[in-house]
Amino acid sequence: MNLVINLILTFLLFSANAVIAEPLDIEINASKAVDLTQPLYKGMPFWPGTEPIQIDRLADYDQGYRMHKFTMWENIGTHVDSPSHFAAGKGMRTIDQLSVNQLIVPIVVINVQDKTATDDDYQLSIEDIQNWESKHGQIKKGRLVLMNTGWYRKFSDPKAYVNQDEAGVLHFPGYSVAAAQLLLERGIAGIGIDTLSLDPGNDLSFPVHNVILGANKFQIENMNNLDALPMTGAIAVIGVLPIREGSQAQARIFALIK
């Protein structure tokens, strides 16, 4: 069945007492949707030093219904970092304060798999961005920029995905600080990646987190299926859990494509 959407979207939020509408002013003409979310399951990759997801079955069909209890850290699986994850102070948004009209956003994909194939520690560079812009035009304001490293294909192999060496150092690609700063100059909505972190795994000072979140932007980690996206033209719908005062939260994210 084809998904056909051709309208000016108005996203409705329902509360106990009222309906609140946020105009998006985004015209969407889409024929398919792509899921950008990694599944949550026992044995999935997780950040070293945290704990794996726990899924406990509390009831089953012999009791009339099936029900589970999930215990997991904020940062496991496909999730969104809010500014408050790293940036303290007045005005730094928590997860529940991310505006709905900023969570339905046009996507820019920068594919660097030719670089990451030979360098696990590769960092997105200014040159990568400039090369993309030479083909597609300058990145427009309000875009969600996704770095496609190809790493998402390793997710089913946690050892390869985390890629921790004998000294405990993690090795996976990420953004450079210079690239993050340039993207902020472009007025982006946020950035995303298909690895455990927006920063390369071997830099635990998290400079990119500090730059992006410090600018009151959001980030997405552990994304999936980025090869299915065009370099430009898709629209992300980011269904992040609105945890009150949360710094991060899991999200079901999909893209609408013409």
Image: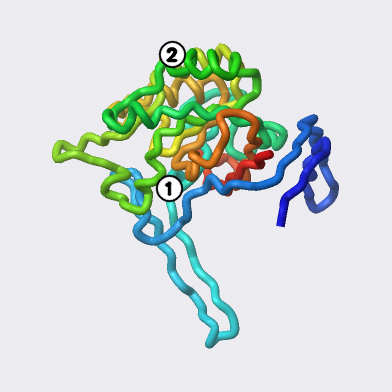
Examine the rendering and report whether any part of residue 98 can be seen: no
The residue under the point 58% across, 38% down is 95
Ranked by sequence position, the earlier of labels 1 and 2 is 1
Name which residue type carries label 2.
Answer: Ile
Residue lying furthest bottom: 62
Residue 153, disc: none
- Crowd class of label 2 (few under 14; some 14 to 19; many from 20; radius 10 Å): some
- Residue furthest toward the left? 166
Q: Nearer the viewer, mark 1 or mark 2?
A: 2
Q: Position of residue 59 (x, y in %)?
A: 51, 78
What residue sits 37% from the left and 26% below the top?
Answer: 206
Is 50 left or right of 20, judged from the image as shown? left
Please report contact status of discs 1 and 2: CB closer than 8 Å, yes or no.
Answer: no
Q: Quadrant of residue 9?
A: top right
Nearest the viewer among 93 and 143 is 143
Image height of 88 relative to 137, above or below: below
Residue 256, x across and y down, in percent = 66, 42
Task: Give me the residue at 53% from left, 13% from top.
Answer: 134
Quadrant in which the N terminus is drawn: bottom right
Q: Which residue is mark 2?
A: 126
Crowd band around label 1 with a 10 angstrom C-alpha radius: few (<14), some (14–19), many (20+): many
Q: Secondary structure at mark 1?
A: loop
- Name the image quarter holding residue 13: top right
**What's the residue at 38%, 28% (across, down)?**
174
The residue under label 1 is: 76
